[in-house]
Image (cartoon, grey):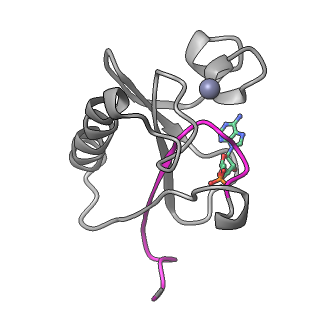
Amino acid sequence: MSDCIFCKIIQGDIPCNKVYEDEHVLAFHDIAPKADTHILVIPKQHIVNLSATTEDEWPIVTKVLQSINKVAAQENLEGFRVISNNGEKGGQEVFHMHWHVLAGSKLTGF
Ligand code: AMP
Ligand code: ZN
């Protein structure tokens, strides 16, 4: 999508601090971290959010979730929290599906 900031990151038009990449998934550090470790894991395919996911897109979502484990292992995260804000009223600001992976000492109870 031409006006999507995360699509621009995937295309290399906007830089990111990359953590992990494969055929379907990109992970990079959040520009405004809310925890010691704050990584965003996104599908390379432009999917808006969970609510908008179509039947044929679910395998991609599964790949994104599987990659969260790879990211956590690679970054030696002993524990982590995963959040995906869904829709404007769910706090979503970037409308390209992303999973926040949060870890570290600043992580408090939810
Ligand atoms: P959300 O509110 O769930 O849509 O989260 C969007 C997240 O994207 C926020 O945590 C932002 O800090 C993050 N973000 C926005 N632009 C960038 C960027 N260029 N590089 C890295 N993270 C970004
Ligand atoms: Zn996009």
- Quarter of the N terminus within the rendering: top right
Q: Is residue 55 left or right of residue 92?
A: left
Is 16 included in the stretch rendered in magenta?
no
Q: Residue at x 53, y 40 (%)?
A: 97
Q: How many marks?
A: 0
Q: Residue at x 71, y 19 (%)?
A: 14
Q: Residue at x 26, y 31 (%)?
A: 59
What percent of the width, then of the height, locates residue 24?
Answer: 35, 21
Q: Which residues are magenta?
A: 92-109
- Is residue 87 placed above or below 24 in the rendered structure? below
What percent of the width, then of the height, locates residue 70?
Answer: 22, 40
Q: Is residue 33 left or right of residue 54?
A: right
Which residue is situated farthest in the front direction here? 55
Which residue is situated farthest in the right direction here? 3
Q: Is residue 79 left or right of residue 5?
A: left
Q: Is residue 16 left or right of residue 44?
A: right
- Is residue 97 placed above or below 37 in the rendered structure? above
Query: Quadrant holding ligand 2?
Result: top right
Q: Residue at x 27, y 38 (%)?
A: 67
What percent of the width, then of the height, locates residue 104?
Answer: 42, 69
**Which of the pair 76/25 is nearer the observer?**
25
- Is residue 65 placed above or below 78 in the rendered structure? above
**Which of the pair 62/109 is nearer the observer?**
62
**Which of the pair 88/67 is nearer the observer?**
88
Main secondary structure of the magenta stretch: loop
